[in-house]
Image: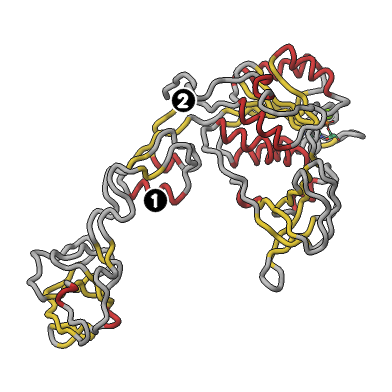
Amino acid sequence: MTDSAPAPDLPALSLAQAIGCLSAYDPQALPVGDACRVIARMLHPVQATEQVAIRAALGRVLADDVMSPIDVPAHDNSAMDGYAVCHADLLPDAPTRLRVAGVALAGRPFGPAPQAGDAVRVMTGAVMPEGTDTVVVQEVTRIEDDSVIVPPGQLAGQNRRLRGEDLRTGTPALERGRIVRPADLGLLASLGIAEVSVRRRLRVAFFSTGDELRSVGEPLAHGQVYDSNRYTLFGMLSRLDVELIDMGVVRDDPNALETAMRTAAGCADAIVSSGGVSVGEADFTREIMARLGDVAFWTVAMRPGRPLAFGRIGEAFYFGLPGNPVAVMITFYFFARAALLRLMGAAPAPQLFTRARSLEAMRKKPGRTEYQRAIVEPGADGELTVRTTGSQGSGVLRSMSRANCVVVLHHEQASVPIGGWVDCLLFDGLV
Ligand code: AMP
Ligand code: MG
């Protein structure tokens, strides 16, 4: 592993500097877009890289552009099973009879060059025999003795793949910042590349806060609840292929919280906590954070969600998510996820919404962003429809578990009538 200094184009900004990019700033009513902008400005990605075998690169972030060391395909070759011919030998308006000189298979070229006026039987992927430029598919041909009869109307160059048509030597096959996907593994293999350079894995520490929380396996006393946030966070973080540091449940106690924050900041690039940032609880959290780092406490104009803390503790970026089980997932998906991808060195990607017709009316006031847990599916006419999954209370985790998407009602958007179009973010796209 090699560590290098942060890239000069990515200066570390203080929170105040990052907030300075906004034309207006009210921490008690911060639009979602503004919170995302401040977060994005402050982050800078991990710089260390490591060289890994391509299979181990799946889900990792490419540290450099990968240049093609070869032309792909490496030779002109046949795209179909049929006969390779020289187009100039074909009669324009009558069948042409050509002697079949032999066969070329994928991986077994025909040689030496066929004589002028000969055809060569070719299979898909076979190198085009010297002097031929066109492939006639076998279905339209007829064999007579050792000759093939080719009907008129063949186009010059048809059914032939040209050398370098997919990729030319020295051009980028994959760009830095890309998260390696299955097709990319195949592409790298097709270029004969065995290893690539990827950014080191991001280390993310996470914990839950709350005196009422018990861990799975412990008995519940009156008023206590099981800690579910550490499980949803584990799931969402695992999908990002980060290194996880599970710090358990931290009690609502200043010393315990301070110790947890110091420990996390000492070993992680990012810290994600749930609970303890709402108005009633934020006071002692605020006081500790002010001592340990540079952290803002926001009320974001959103539902569910609202309380959110963000900033830096030492070298680590801190995301203080609300405690409600749905709110923690929504704030993770809409703030922390994109931020962590950025820290991993991934190129920013636009949020891709799917448009669907709402089967129900949705009440909404402009001035905040709302997220409705919902199920999107095709209607009878094939058009996508969407309906919510019952009670939208921010503690109702089942509404999230049954959903396959969230409907995003944007900041300026007003109520949606039955049949109105809405933007949905599909969970299946959230790798
Ligand atoms: P807080 O943001 O800490 O005020 O928590 C808001 C609500 O979410 C309270 O009802 C908490 O009991 C609940 N809550 C907080 N953390 C968790 C957790 N880790 N698992 C389940 N529920 C939680
Ligand atoms: Mg709490």
- Going 66% across and 37% down the picture, which residue do you hit? 234
Q: Residue furthest front?
A: 23
Quadrant in which residue 317 is drawn = top right
- Going 31% across and 44% down the picture, which residue do you hit? 68
Decide: is 172 above or below 29: below
Q: What element does badge 1 sit on?
A: helix
Q: State which quarter of the image contains the N terminus.
A: top left
The x and y percentages for residue 388 are 79, 56
Viewer-nearest residue: 126 or 256: 126
Q: CA distance from mark 2 to mark 1?
A: 25 Å
- Going 69% across and 24% down the picture, which residue do you hit? 19
Q: What element does badge 2 sit on?
A: loop
Q: Residue furthest top?
A: 291
**Mark 2 touches mark 1? (CB < 8 Å):** no
Viewer-nearest residue: 369 or 58: 369
Decide: is 120 above or below 407: below
Q: Which mark is residue 275?
A: none
Viewer-nearest residue: 217 or 349: 349
Classify residue 356 as left or right of residue 418: left
User: How many numbered discs sit on the rendered protein?
Assistant: 2
- The residue that label 1 is drawn on is 186
Q: Assess disc 1: are there few (<14), some (14-19) or many (≥20) residues with their C-alpha within 10 Å of its C-alpha.
A: few
Three-letter code, disc 2: Ala
Three-letter code, disc 1: Gly
Decide: is 72 above or below 98: above
Viewer-nearest residue: 180 or 32: 32
Q: Which mark is residue 48?
A: 2
Q: Assess disc 2: are there few (<14), some (14-19) or many (≥20) residues with their C-alpha within 10 Å of its C-alpha.
A: some
Lower sequence index among marks 2 and 1: 2
**Quadrant location, ligand no. 1:** top right
Is the C-beta of the residue carrying label 1 under 8 Å from the nearest atom of ligand 1?
Answer: no
Residue 290 visible, this orientation: yes
